[in-house]
Image (spheres, grey):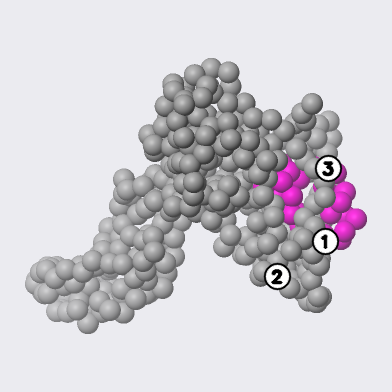
Amino acid sequence: MNWLNFEVRTEQAMKIKDIIAILEAMAPTAYAEDFDNVGLLTGNDGATATGIMVCHDALESVIDEAISKNCNIVVCFHPILFSGLKKITGKNYVERAVIKAIKNDIALYAVHTALDNHKQGVNKIFCDALGLTETRILIPKEGFIRKLVTYTIPENAETLRNALFDAGAGNIGNYEYCSFTSIGMGSYQGNADSKPEVGAPGEFVEAQEIKIEVTFEKHLEGKILKALFSSHIYEEAAYEVYTLDNRHQNIGLGMTGELATPMEEAAFLQFVRDTMKAGGIRHSAYTGRMIKKVAVLGGSGSFAIKNAIASGADAFLTADLKYHQFYEAEGKLLLADIGHFESERFTSDYMAGFLSERIQEIPVVISGVNTNPVYYL
């Protein structure tokens, strides 16, 4: 489908916050890197949405286009507001875009590393464009998995565990409702003001208890604890929350995948150039090996060179590499800089498609402005 000319059929009231809920499903802001600035950047989420413009960079020219097409929310990949603004006087391209958006009541929403880290996001799009299969996250996210341990009486165990599942606990990769349950002996003695479920105030009680253990993604902790407290039968719910060292295998930066048929290095680079419409490719010295396993990281990915080597990839495709970083290939893989915009080229198509499949009330339009700041001879 040509998303550039895509328009929907009906006109119904829809709030910007309703669109944000859909964007959260596509790229949860909790997935973003700590340094990033994702989510709603300008605008009132309670306003009625008139149209959605999708773009790579929310430049002033894109805001002008949104105004002309009656789109009052611009969904951009890169956040136009990345670092703090001390003054907003219109002296540079960032300030001018923000001023125009605010003056015209246009909401700006950025996804950036929230979509980078999603298993169906930027790097999966990159892999799909190249026809790569057997895809895996290159750098799984650390410190993102937490574990809840709680204790209750047997009569409350099923109700409590199901409430935790409903709140999002126990999802591991392709599996749901994952937990571990064990039986033990608990003890307690309440004071005069206590209201124990078993026994009486002042009585020392030993009773059989069920220990329930579930893991969850850290941004769900508030929801998980709310479910725990509302479903636990005890006056004082006993629980522990741990941050695990486990890496989240389904969230993270970069991805690896495999070509259906190995290719010689020169032919592979030409294939990448044609597929990603790259103006040019800078690359390290050829290794003399066939390319089968490929690592990709859309955008600036020099920090992941060692990860790509460790993954056993024959080639690593990314952008924004500096002169000395090409040495880091050390003959262990083919390192290629295909251009920042080029490595994220199909992201806007994906975002527009995701939104259009879920929104019928207002138009979803891809910006026709080319925001790539790099040109080639």
- Above-or-below relation of 363 to 326: below
Q: CA distance from mark 1 to mark 3?
A: 21 Å
Q: Is residue 175 left or right of residue 363?
A: left
Label 2 is placed on what type of residue?
Ile
User: Looking at the picture, which amino acid does disc 1 mark?
Assistant: Asn
Q: Secondary structure at mark 2?
A: loop
98 to the left or right of 161: right
Which residue in the protein does label 2 denote? 359
> Which residue was labeled with disc 1?
5
Find disc 3 in the rendering and name its residue: 60
Residue 151 in the figure: left or right of residue 53: left
Q: Which structural element holds mark 3?
A: helix
The x, y position of residue 360, in whole percent, is 73, 73
Q: Depth-wise, is mark 3 or mark 2 nearer the camera?
A: 2
How far apart are the alpha carbons under marks 3 and 2?
Answer: 26 Å
Dividing the picture into quadrants, the one containing residue 26 is bottom right
In this view, which residue lies farthest toward the right? 68
- Between circles 1 and 3, the one closer to the viewer is 1
Q: Quadrant of the N terminus?
A: bottom right
Most foreground residue, 224 or 303 = 303
The magenta span reads 54-82
Q: Which mark is residue 317?
A: none
Q: Residues within 10 Å of mark 3 (few under 14, many from 20)?
A: some
Of the residues shown, which amino acid type is indicated by label 3?
Glu
Relative horizontal placement of residue 363, taking residue 199 as reference (left or right): right
Sequence order check, earlier mark of 2 and 1? 1
